[in-house]
Image (cartoon, rainbow, N blue to C red):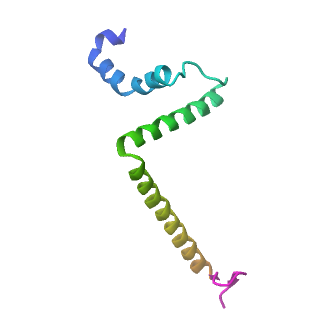
């Protein structure tokens, strides 16, 4: 087996990759999937690992820091989106200061 010939690589894999699966299986009780089929199980895993990652982030940086970062990210996205809409409106000659949005003369 490859495990016996590459013990150091296997130890590294155990530490990095298998830890989340062990935590979910033994710590959280997800020893089996509730759904059947590759697509459904993939969706179930996505939800479970999203929860796992969110919990890790909360443990590492805390609630306050996470909320600050999300707020910066969200408002940055809104500002970027508004800038793109304004740029598009200017390129297309649309005025959007009035409710009906009309073409510029």
Expressed as whole percent of the image width and height from the top left, the position of residue 8 reads 26, 18
Q: Based on the picture, tell me whether residue 17 belongs to the magenta stretch.
A: no
The image quadrant that residue 17 belongs to is top left
Which residue is painted at 36% across and 45% down in the image?
61
- Front residue of 83/103: it is 83
Locate the C terminus and report the quarter of the image it occupies: bottom right
Q: How many numbered discs sit on the rendered protein?
A: 0
Residue 99 in the figure: left or right of residue 13: right
Tell me where the magenta segment starts and ends, as one range: 94-105
Q: Where does the image place residue 32, in percent across and percent down from the top left?
A: 58, 19
Q: Is 100 inside the magenta-drawn segment?
A: yes
In the picture shown, does residue 103 fall above or below 51? below
Q: Quadrant of residue 30?
A: top right
Residue extending furthest toward the right: 100
Q: What residue appears at the point 62 percent right and 78 percent down from the top-left corner?
A: 92
Tell me where residue 54 appears, x and y as whole percent: 47, 41
Q: Residue at x 54, y 67 (%)?
A: 81
């Amino acid at each position: 087996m490859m495990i016996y010939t590459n013990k150091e690589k296997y130890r590294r894999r155990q530490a990095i990759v298998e830890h989340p699966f062990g935590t979910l299986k033994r710590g959280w009780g997800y020893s089996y999937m509730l759904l059947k089929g590759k697509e459904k199980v993939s969706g179930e895993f996505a939800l479970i690992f999203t929860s796992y990652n969110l919990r890790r982030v909360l443990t590492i940086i805390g609630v306050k820091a996470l909320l600050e970062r999300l707020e910066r990210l969200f408002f940055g996205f809104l500002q970027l989106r508004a800038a793109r809409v304004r740029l598009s409106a200017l390129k297309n000659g649309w005025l959007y200061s009035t409710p009906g949005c009309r073409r510029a003369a």
